[in-house]
Image (tube, grey):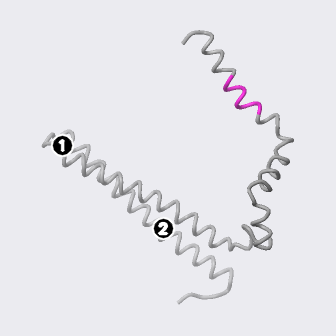
Amino acid sequence: MNKITKMFLSAAMFAFLVIPALSISNNMALAQDIESRYGMTDVESELDGRLGQNEDPKVLITRFINLALTFLGLIAVVIILIGGFKWMTSGGNEEKTTSARKLLVAGVVGLVIVLASWGLASWLIGTVSDTTTGTTSS
């Protein structure tokens, strides 16, 4: 790239990074304007101020852990599928078969780790919840 293009790109990146930081004082007014413009204040008033409040931390943590482990489980399954596809399309080539077998093993090990993590997290959250609330689960 020539010198002018590099300078233009540098100036544009600088502007995108610095200009929002300089307008911090206007962010509160902007946020309030966006809330009123898009009806967030109306929604919150209809919900009697309960928007995002009174949520049990145990439920939030459980949802986050389940979401993260679901995502990781999907990645492990995709790795297993890619390994199987590579193995089926290797055409008997020993090098490709070995690479595919490594992918399959890595995917299965990842899936086992994700499932063990889910079990451990479920047990831990249940135990901590029972301990803090004073109830026992049977």
Q: Which residue corresponds to the image point at 66% horizontal and 20% vertical from the top-left?
A: 10
At which x and y percent is residue 126? 57, 78
Amino acid on which disc 2 is placed = Trp
At which x and y percent is residue 36? 80, 56
Front residue of 32 and 98: 32
What range of the chain is rendered magenta? 12-19
Task: Let me know if residue 45 is in the magenta part.
Answer: no
What residue is shown with label 2?
118
Front residue of 6 and 126: 6
The numbered mark, 1 or 2, whose residue comes first in the sequence reads 1
* Left or right, 50 with reference to 134: right
What residue is shown with label 1?
90
Looking at the figure, which quarter contains the N terminus?
Answer: top right
At which x and y percent is residue 95? 20, 39
Please tell me in which quadrant of the rendered image residue 74 appears.
bottom left
Contact, mark 1 vs mark 2 (Cβ under 8 Å): no
At which x and y percent is residue 123? 53, 75
